[in-house]
Image (cartoon, coloured by chain):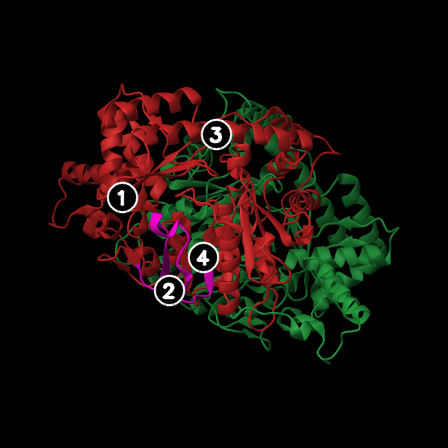
Chain colours: A green, B red
Amino acid sequence: MSSMQLSPSISSSSSAIFGQKSFNSRTFRASIALKRSGVCKCVATPEQTAYTTKVARNENLAKLQAGYLFPEIARRRGAHLLKYPDAQVISLGIGDTTEPIPDVITSAMAERARALSTLEGYSGYGAEQGENKLRAAIASTFYKGLGIEETDVFVSDGAKCDITRLQILFGSNVTMAVQDPSYPAYVDSSVIMGQTGQFQKDVEKFGNIEYMRCNPENRFFPDLSSTAKTDIIFFCSPNNPTGATATREQLTQLVQFAKRNGSIIVYDSAYAMYISDDSPRSIFEIPGAKEVAIETSSFSKYAGFTGVRLGWTAVPKELLYSGGFPVAKDFNRIFCTCFNGASNICQAGGLACLSPEGLSAMQDVIGFYKENTQIIVDTFNSLGFKVYGGKNAPYVWVHFPGRSSWDVFAEILEKTHVVTTPGSGFGPGGEGFIRVSAFGHRENVLEACRRFKQLYK
Amino acid sequence: MSSMQLSPSISSSSSAIFGQKSFNSRTFRASIALKRSGVCKCVATPEQTAYTTKVARNENLAKLQAGYLFPEIARRRGAHLLKYPDAQVISLGIGDTTEPIPDVITSAMAERARALSTLEGYSGYGAEQGENKLRAAIASTFYKGLGIEETDVFVSDGAKCDITRLQILFGSNVTMAVQDPSYPAYVDSSVIMGQTGQFQKDVEKFGNIEYMRCNPENRFFPDLSSTAKTDIIFFCSPNNPTGATATREQLTQLVQFAKRNGSIIVYDSAYAMYISDDSPRSIFEIPGAKEVAIETSSFSKYAGFTGVRLGWTAVPKELLYSGGFPVAKDFNRIFCTCFNGASNICQAGGLACLSPEGLSAMQDVIGFYKENTQIIVDTFNSLGFKVYGGKNAPYVWVHFPGRSSWDVFAEILEKTHVVTTPGSGFGPGGEGFIRVSAFGHRENVLEACRRFKQLYK
């Protein structure tokens, strides 16, 4: 997948991503015009005569290997639909929520929207860090007794956006570690910020990133004794894509590891509410974590806010750079300079999510998706596959030993019209696996499972 | 203002920004505990024994001189209120909209919010670039006949956020030029991305940024014959803070200048709808601009969306890096990796803004603010001040020759309880000026003007 590195004249394979179709048609019109006017004195094609600026392309963007994973999956889904226009395609791929948002939450957003038409209800710029009420509600709901206060919480338009803001915070001169496999935004944003070397095709890794392999052999927790020291450690639990959830003992090891090395952990807890055993729901449950960790999370998978956009990042005041400067103070500057706060309407939704009715309604939706997960786990188990994840996470991680993930992805799409996600899209450690998302209407999940049984019986 | 560079133990002057108060109180509690337990064997203070990570602070953030301008203004407003708890403070400072959003727009948002509770109306992740309908409506409303198509438009959560995304796009190795004075996010985001040198106190400028002086002498259009060549040129018209609007001839010069140098113009048109003469409303009205310019804009000042958050950036497919690679293709990658789309509810609001009723309602609100502007302009004119801007912009730029902007800001706040913005906050070229924003309820604008007349009669 090196189409992003080709010159524009031969890069039409990635055209669907941003509508290069019209780019081509413009060129086409230009050729026609040239021919009609009869002025065709030169042999140069219109592409070659196009004006170019003297600004060099950002070399970090050139390092990226292909389109971001999920738009690429969407592109393949689109191509499949063109090939089979009548197919009933079911998407268990992108991890996109499908169930309606509980009334108590949308009512609050509708009410806030309407109030913006009144003199009393109108509000303009809010605090970049979020409304105090919501910051307080997040602190007391998710971090009660853990020493995370209202002022430590930065409300945002989602964890994915915060990951980039954290990379801007750290800058180009840090080193980072990621679980392998992991959510691709960690690595891609690191590449974009210039923290990495080139992509090394032989190992399918970027230089200067520490890939912490997580697989069935180590029960999806990295071998820290062989993990290199880095400035930053991205860690997601319950994990996307493997669904693995770190135990209290494992997280204690992780915090001790970070403390020994002086590293900062960026802990992604976007799936914490899916935990049904006694695994920690926040890194801050681990003693000492406030001195080494940042936590980022989101309403996306709790309240179906994938399209609404609302998340948060907690940066403890105890977290200090080597010189003693508080990390939160710089993160606050990033929030004020590079962001202007989450939408006031969406913040009203977030506040409703954290009311007693909202919390109970969110639990119902999460419970529904967890039933889906069980159906998918049971299906693959019954077919004799090794299945991981699923227990504390909406993702099922299915092993196809010895096979290429993209081949399995293509086989499943071609033969069952079900979209999954190839494990290798999450890093080389995902090769041989497929991630099946439990986000879907019940009848679609049941139908997808029927088709899986047909294919792999 | 160098408090951001002090060590944490003596940086309490900037504590209000992110609540260092609680940081101090924690330390305080720790000292108490030590004393009570009688275990006080060492002379070290708790600050000195605090654990620090080994991660170095991002040196680019350390270059920044103070808090971002507008939170700093808010902080001073807060301090003033503490000093005069009964004062009727009027804010004509931050440029924050105050008038309710027209019903036709909030109804669309409320409806979209409510629909998210239904099976048919629910939507999860949208396209990162925005919904096609909205992209098409933006293209046809603001760029009709200019060759900017739906696929060139990236819908975002606001122009300020897009400015940082553009800086991420360009990376650390570009040089940039800004109007002086200008909206501080251009310079600050450039500093954060590592494009600049240190702050030079003698000239009040960052190294490696080309400051294009705009003042009454050059009618607020820079002398391009003495402007150094840079990769990127930030240009805002109607300008924030001066309110100056570039003519067609001036913008043609700017485009030719960029073309000669191979530069990319980032054109900020966030106030274009305030133009009432025949000045261009988009850089793309200038022939050839699509090969050298990006345009960023926002619903904030048109529809009162400062708290709702919705904007866009148009990146023409004709804009190419030196090697021929399309800039839009990399910007698309940034959008997909570092962002997840604007809120679906806010996008419904944007679409309603661009309906015939929405456009007419927005024009009414803009007309109201333009009346405010005239009241402010007339007031300062009547007091004998030289007044600039105001005609095509919601900002009035008042000259106080020979005086420090911060002194004038403080004088006005102290004596009239009106918050303005000191011109030097926008760059050294703003020294000696005050920006008065026309965003305010009519009675507040009238009252502020009465107080100005009292003070400066």
B364 in the magenta segment? no
Task: Tell me residue A110's x, y (percent).
Answer: 60, 26
B224 in the magenta segment? yes
Report whether residue A149 is seen. no
Q: What kind of residue is marked 3?
A: Tyr
Q: Compared with residue A314, is residue B172 higher up or lower down, i.e. above or below?
A: below
Query: Mark 3 belongs to which subunit?
Result: B
Rendered image: mark on residue B432: 1
Q: CA distance from mark 3 to mark 4?
A: 39 Å
Image quadrant in which the N terminus of chain A is located = bottom right
Report whether residue B414 is seen. yes
Q: CA distance from mark 1 to mark 3?
A: 25 Å
Residue at (32, 43) in percent of width and height: B423
Image quadrant in which the C terminus of chain A is located = bottom right
Query: Mark 4 = which residue?
Result: A167
Highlighted range, magenta: B206-233
Query: Mark 3 = which residue?
Result: B369
Query: Dot 4, crowdedness within 10 Å: few (<14), some or many (≥20)?
Result: many
Q: CA distance from mark 1 to mark 4?
A: 38 Å
Query: Dot 2, crowdedness within 10 Å: few (<14), some or many (≥20)?
Result: few
Query: Mark 2 = which residue?
Result: B226
Q: Earlier in the sequence, mark 2 or mark 3?
A: 2
Does the residue at mark 1 contact the one at mark 3 (Cβ under 8 Å)? Answer: no
